[in-house]
Protein backbone atom coordinates (compact mmCIF):
# COMPACT_ATOMS: atom_id res chain seq x y z
CA UNK A 1 0.00 0.00 0.00
CA UNK A 2 2.98 2.34 0.43
CA UNK A 3 3.70 2.13 -3.31
CA UNK A 4 0.03 2.74 -4.08
CA UNK A 5 -0.08 5.75 -1.76
CA UNK A 6 3.03 7.26 -3.38
CA UNK A 7 1.44 6.86 -6.81
CA UNK A 8 -1.75 8.60 -5.72
CA UNK A 9 0.09 11.41 -3.93
CA UNK A 10 2.06 12.06 -7.13
CA UNK A 11 -1.19 12.76 -8.99
CA UNK A 12 -2.80 15.27 -6.59
CA UNK A 13 -1.82 17.75 -3.90
CA UNK A 14 -4.99 16.95 -1.90
CA UNK A 15 -4.33 15.08 1.36
CA UNK A 16 -7.74 13.98 2.70
CA UNK A 17 -8.40 12.90 6.28
CA UNK A 18 -11.91 11.66 5.45
CA UNK A 19 -12.78 8.74 3.17
CA UNK A 20 -15.99 7.40 1.65
CA UNK A 21 -16.73 3.97 0.20
CA UNK A 22 -19.69 4.00 -2.19
CA UNK A 23 -22.03 1.03 -2.53
CA UNK A 24 -24.16 -0.23 -5.42
CA UNK A 25 -26.00 2.52 -7.27
CA UNK A 26 -24.56 5.28 -5.06
CA UNK A 27 -21.70 6.36 -7.30
CA UNK A 28 -23.22 9.75 -8.16
CA UNK A 29 -21.55 11.31 -5.12
CA UNK A 30 -18.10 10.88 -6.66
CA UNK A 31 -19.21 12.92 -9.67
CA UNK A 32 -20.17 15.83 -7.40
CA UNK A 33 -16.57 16.48 -6.26
CA UNK A 34 -14.53 19.39 -7.61
CA UNK A 35 -10.77 19.46 -8.34
CA UNK A 36 -11.11 15.71 -8.58
CA UNK A 37 -8.56 13.20 -9.80
CA UNK A 38 -9.91 9.81 -10.85
CA UNK A 39 -7.63 6.79 -10.79
CA UNK A 40 -8.93 3.39 -11.97
CA UNK A 41 -8.27 0.55 -9.53
CA UNK A 42 -6.48 -1.28 -12.33
CA UNK A 43 -3.73 1.38 -12.20
CA UNK A 44 -3.22 1.19 -8.42
CA UNK A 45 -0.69 -1.38 -7.15
CA UNK A 46 -2.17 -3.91 -4.74
CA UNK A 47 -5.83 -3.22 -5.48
CA UNK A 48 -8.16 -5.77 -7.10
CA UNK A 49 -10.49 -4.74 -9.91
CA UNK A 50 -14.12 -4.11 -8.99
CA UNK A 51 -16.35 -6.38 -11.10
CA UNK A 52 -19.76 -5.78 -9.47
CA UNK A 53 -22.40 -4.05 -11.59
CA UNK A 54 -23.02 -0.52 -10.33
CA UNK A 55 -19.44 -0.07 -9.06
CA UNK A 56 -17.30 2.29 -11.17
CA UNK A 57 -14.04 0.82 -9.89
CA UNK A 58 -11.99 3.95 -9.33
CA UNK A 59 -10.49 6.02 -6.55
CA UNK A 60 -11.55 9.67 -6.67
CA UNK A 61 -9.60 12.30 -4.71
CA UNK A 62 -11.30 15.70 -4.63
CA UNK A 63 -13.10 18.40 -2.70
CA UNK A 64 -16.73 18.28 -1.65
CA UNK A 65 -18.47 21.63 -1.20
CA UNK A 66 -17.74 25.07 -2.67
CA UNK A 67 -19.44 28.40 -3.47
CA UNK A 68 -19.79 29.48 0.14
CA UNK A 69 -20.45 26.00 1.49
CA UNK A 70 -18.09 24.25 3.89
CA UNK A 71 -15.50 22.39 1.83
CA UNK A 72 -13.74 19.18 2.75
CA UNK A 73 -11.09 17.16 0.96
CA UNK A 74 -12.15 13.55 0.59
CA UNK A 75 -10.94 10.24 -0.82
CA UNK A 76 -13.79 8.30 -2.42
CA UNK A 77 -13.76 4.65 -3.38
CA UNK A 78 -16.32 4.55 -6.15
CA UNK A 79 -16.96 0.83 -5.91
CA UNK A 80 -15.65 -1.80 -3.51
CA UNK A 81 -14.52 -5.43 -3.49
CA UNK A 82 -16.63 -8.38 -2.31
CA UNK A 83 -15.98 -11.93 -1.22
CA UNK A 84 -18.54 -13.11 -3.79
CA UNK A 85 -16.30 -11.81 -6.58
CA UNK A 86 -13.80 -14.47 -5.56
CA UNK A 87 -11.48 -12.17 -3.63
CA UNK A 88 -9.82 -13.07 -0.35
CA UNK A 89 -10.77 -11.22 2.86
CA UNK A 90 -7.44 -9.38 2.64
CA UNK A 91 -8.21 -8.25 -0.92
CA UNK A 92 -11.69 -7.12 0.12
CA UNK A 93 -10.16 -4.66 2.62
CA UNK A 94 -7.28 -3.51 0.41
CA UNK A 95 -9.06 -0.22 -0.27
CA UNK A 96 -9.45 0.47 3.44
CA UNK A 97 -5.76 -0.30 3.98
CA UNK A 98 -4.93 2.16 1.20
CA UNK A 99 -7.11 4.91 2.68
CA UNK A 100 -5.32 4.45 5.98
CA UNK A 101 -1.94 4.69 4.26
CA UNK A 102 -3.10 7.95 2.64
CA UNK A 103 -3.81 9.41 6.08
CA UNK A 104 -7.58 8.95 6.24
CA UNK A 105 -8.69 8.75 9.88
CA UNK A 106 -12.48 8.69 9.46
CA UNK A 107 -14.33 6.67 6.84
CA UNK A 108 -17.97 6.58 5.74
CA UNK A 109 -18.95 3.13 4.52
CA UNK A 110 -22.11 3.15 2.42
CA UNK A 111 -24.00 0.25 0.93
CA UNK A 112 -27.21 -0.88 -0.69
CA UNK A 113 -29.10 -3.17 1.68
CA UNK A 114 -32.26 -5.18 1.98
CA UNK A 115 -34.65 -3.92 4.62
CA UNK A 116 -35.74 -6.38 7.32
CA UNK A 117 -37.08 -3.90 9.86
CA UNK A 118 -40.70 -3.12 8.88
CA UNK A 119 -40.14 0.58 9.62
CA UNK A 120 -37.84 0.86 6.59
CA UNK A 121 -39.41 1.67 3.22
CA UNK A 122 -37.51 1.42 -0.05
CA UNK A 123 -35.15 4.37 -0.29
CA UNK A 124 -34.76 4.75 3.50
CA UNK A 125 -31.35 5.83 4.80
CA UNK A 126 -30.15 3.93 7.86
CA UNK A 127 -27.16 4.56 10.13
CA UNK A 128 -25.46 1.28 11.02
CA UNK A 129 -25.19 0.93 14.79
CA UNK A 130 -23.58 -2.54 14.74
CA UNK A 131 -23.13 -5.54 12.48
CA UNK A 132 -23.46 -9.32 12.51
CA UNK A 133 -20.74 -10.91 10.39
CA UNK A 134 -22.14 -14.08 8.81
CA UNK A 135 -19.70 -14.12 5.88
CA UNK A 136 -17.53 -16.82 7.42
CA UNK A 137 -14.41 -14.72 6.96
CA UNK A 138 -12.27 -12.15 8.75
CA UNK A 139 -9.50 -10.04 7.16
CA UNK A 140 -7.32 -10.34 10.27
CA UNK A 141 -6.91 -14.12 9.95
CA UNK A 142 -3.31 -15.11 9.23
CA UNK A 143 0.02 -13.58 10.15
CA UNK A 144 -0.52 -10.30 11.99
CA UNK A 145 1.24 -7.13 10.86
CA UNK A 146 1.64 -5.02 14.03
CA UNK A 147 2.10 -1.90 11.88
CA UNK A 148 -1.59 -2.14 10.98
CA UNK A 149 -2.82 -2.41 14.55
CA UNK A 150 -3.46 -4.87 17.38
CA UNK A 151 -3.93 -8.58 16.83
CA UNK A 152 -7.22 -8.55 18.75
CA UNK A 153 -8.94 -5.18 18.10
CA UNK A 154 -11.92 -4.27 20.26
CA UNK A 155 -15.22 -4.14 18.35
CA UNK A 156 -17.50 -2.91 21.15
CA UNK A 157 -18.11 0.32 19.23
CA UNK A 158 -17.26 -0.74 15.70
CA UNK A 159 -19.41 2.10 14.33
CA UNK A 160 -18.57 5.34 16.13
CA UNK A 161 -21.36 6.65 18.37
CA UNK A 162 -19.91 10.15 18.03
CA UNK A 163 -20.00 10.04 14.24
CA UNK A 164 -23.55 8.69 14.30
CA UNK A 165 -24.58 11.68 16.41
CA UNK A 166 -22.98 14.02 13.89
CA UNK A 167 -24.95 12.28 11.13
CA UNK A 168 -28.22 12.53 13.08
CA UNK A 169 -27.64 16.25 13.70
CA UNK A 170 -26.90 16.88 10.01
CA UNK A 171 -29.97 14.92 8.93
CA UNK A 172 -32.19 16.88 11.34
CA UNK A 173 -30.92 20.22 10.03
CA UNK A 174 -31.47 19.09 6.44
CA UNK A 175 -34.91 17.63 7.29
CA UNK A 176 -33.87 14.21 6.03
CA UNK A 177 -35.47 11.23 7.76
CA UNK A 178 -32.85 8.79 8.97
CA UNK A 179 -33.08 5.51 10.86
CA UNK A 180 -30.61 3.38 12.80
CA UNK A 181 -30.16 -0.38 12.85
CA UNK A 182 -28.03 -3.52 12.84
CA UNK A 183 -26.54 -4.74 9.54
CA UNK A 184 -26.15 -8.45 8.79
CA UNK A 185 -23.36 -9.27 6.32
CA UNK A 186 -23.92 -12.35 4.14
CA UNK A 187 -21.60 -13.94 1.61
CA UNK A 188 -23.82 -13.68 -1.50
CA UNK A 189 -24.05 -13.33 -4.41
CA UNK A 190 -27.46 -15.02 -4.31
CA UNK A 191 -30.06 -13.12 -2.35
CA UNK A 192 -31.25 -14.57 0.93
CA UNK A 193 -34.16 -16.97 1.18
CA UNK A 194 -37.29 -15.98 3.12
CA UNK A 195 -36.29 -18.50 5.81
CA UNK A 196 -32.87 -16.86 6.14
CA UNK A 197 -34.53 -13.46 6.49
CA UNK A 198 -36.74 -14.78 9.28
CA UNK A 199 -33.60 -16.10 10.97
CA UNK A 200 -31.80 -12.77 10.60
CA UNK A 201 -34.78 -10.92 12.07
CA UNK A 202 -34.80 -13.32 15.03
CA UNK A 203 -31.12 -12.68 15.84
CA UNK A 204 -31.55 -8.91 15.74
CA UNK A 205 -30.74 -7.78 12.20
CA UNK A 206 -32.54 -4.78 10.68
CA UNK A 207 -30.70 -4.82 7.35
CA UNK A 208 -28.92 -7.36 5.19
CA UNK A 209 -26.20 -7.00 2.58
CA UNK A 210 -23.01 -8.50 1.17
CA UNK A 211 -20.32 -6.02 2.21
CA UNK A 212 -19.12 -3.55 4.87
CA UNK A 213 -18.42 -5.88 7.82
CA UNK A 214 -14.88 -6.86 6.77
CA UNK A 215 -14.05 -3.25 5.91
CA UNK A 216 -15.24 -2.17 9.34
CA UNK A 217 -13.07 -4.79 11.05
CA UNK A 218 -9.98 -3.63 9.14
CA UNK A 219 -10.73 0.05 9.80
CA UNK A 220 -11.11 -0.58 13.52
CA UNK A 221 -7.83 -2.45 13.64
CA UNK A 222 -6.19 0.62 12.07
CA UNK A 223 -7.86 2.92 14.61
CA UNK A 224 -10.02 4.57 11.95
CA UNK A 225 -13.44 5.80 13.04
CA UNK A 226 -16.30 4.32 11.01
CA UNK A 227 -19.68 5.74 10.06
CA UNK A 228 -21.91 3.26 8.22
CA UNK A 229 -24.89 4.33 6.11
CA UNK A 230 -27.18 1.89 4.32
CA UNK A 231 -29.63 2.76 1.58
CA UNK A 232 -32.58 0.36 1.68
CA UNK A 233 -32.90 -0.50 -2.00
CA UNK A 234 -35.37 -3.35 -1.56
CA UNK A 235 -37.39 -5.12 1.08
CA UNK A 236 -35.71 -8.40 2.00
CA UNK A 237 -36.88 -11.72 0.54
CA UNK A 238 -40.39 -12.74 1.49
CA UNK A 239 -41.39 -9.30 2.81
CA UNK A 240 -42.67 -7.62 -0.35
CA UNK A 241 -44.22 -10.44 -2.35
CA UNK A 242 -41.86 -9.62 -5.25
CA UNK A 243 -38.78 -11.37 -6.56
CA UNK A 244 -35.49 -9.53 -6.01
CA UNK A 245 -33.27 -8.19 -8.77
CA UNK A 246 -30.03 -6.21 -8.93
CA UNK A 247 -31.65 -3.89 -11.47
CA UNK A 248 -34.11 -2.83 -8.77
CA UNK A 249 -31.25 -2.20 -6.36
CA UNK A 250 -29.53 0.10 -8.86
CA UNK A 251 -32.77 1.92 -9.72
CA UNK A 252 -33.62 2.71 -6.08
CA UNK A 253 -30.02 3.83 -5.58
CA UNK A 254 -30.36 6.27 -8.47
CA UNK A 255 -33.71 7.49 -7.17
CA UNK A 256 -32.35 8.35 -3.73
CA UNK A 257 -29.01 9.72 -5.02
CA UNK A 258 -29.89 13.41 -4.59
CA UNK A 259 -30.97 12.93 -0.98
CA UNK A 260 -27.94 10.77 -0.30
CA UNK A 261 -25.57 13.40 -1.72
CA UNK A 262 -27.32 16.10 0.28
CA UNK A 263 -26.86 14.10 3.49
CA UNK A 264 -23.20 13.32 2.81
CA UNK A 265 -22.59 16.99 1.97
CA UNK A 266 -23.96 17.90 5.39
CA UNK A 267 -22.00 15.23 7.26
CA UNK A 268 -18.52 15.33 5.73
CA UNK A 269 -17.42 18.86 6.76
CA UNK A 270 -18.39 18.00 10.34
CA UNK A 271 -16.38 14.79 10.21
CA UNK A 272 -13.39 16.74 8.95
CA UNK A 273 -13.49 19.33 11.74
CA UNK A 274 -15.01 17.56 14.77
CA UNK A 275 -12.73 16.53 17.60
CA UNK A 276 -14.12 13.34 19.07
CA UNK A 277 -12.33 11.38 21.76
Image: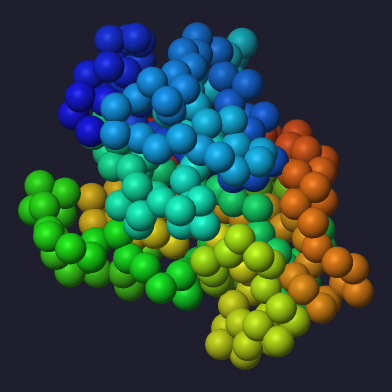
Q: Position of residue 200 (x, y in %)?
A: 61, 82
**Residue nearer the viewer, 56 or 157:** 56
Q: In which quarter of the image is the N terminus?
A: top left
Task: Give the mark count.
Answer: 0
Q: Which residue is drawn at 30% across and 59% down?
A: 139
- In this picture, is 108 found above or below 129? above
Q: Residue at x 12, y 60 (%)?
A: 143
**Residue 65 makes an appearance in the image:** no
Query: Horizontal placement of 252 versus 74: left or right?
Result: right
**Residue nearer the viewer, 266 or 251:** 251
Q: Position of residue 77 (x, y in %)?
A: 48, 34
Q: In which quarter of the image is residue 10?
A: top left
Q: Where is residue 256 in the image (x, y as percent from the top left)?
A: 77, 42
Q: Where is residue 14 in the image (x, y as percent from the top left)?
A: 35, 15
Q: Residue at x 32, y 18 (%)?
A: 8
**Residue 199 makes an appearance in the image:** yes
Query: Horizontal placement of 235 versus 13: left or right?
Result: right
- In this picture, is 171 found above or below 100? below
- In this picture, is 99 found above or below 211? above
Q: Which residue is drawn at 33% across and 72% down?
A: 156
Q: For the view shown, which residue lies furthest in the right direction?
A: 241
Query: Horizontal placement of 234 versus 224: left or right?
Result: right
Q: How is the image coloured?
A: rainbow
- In this picture, is 161 found above or below 136? above
Q: For the view shown, which residue lies furthest in the left direction?
A: 146
Q: Quadrant of residue 97?
A: top left
Amino acid sequence: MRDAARLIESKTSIRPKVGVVLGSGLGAFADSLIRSVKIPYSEIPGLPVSTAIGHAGQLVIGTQGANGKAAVDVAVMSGRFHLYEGYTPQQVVAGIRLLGQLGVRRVVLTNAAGGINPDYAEGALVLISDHINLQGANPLVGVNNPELGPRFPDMTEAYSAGLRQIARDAAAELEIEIFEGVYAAMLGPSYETPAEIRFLKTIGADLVGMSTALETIAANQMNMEVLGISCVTNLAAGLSGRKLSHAEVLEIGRRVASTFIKLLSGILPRLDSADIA
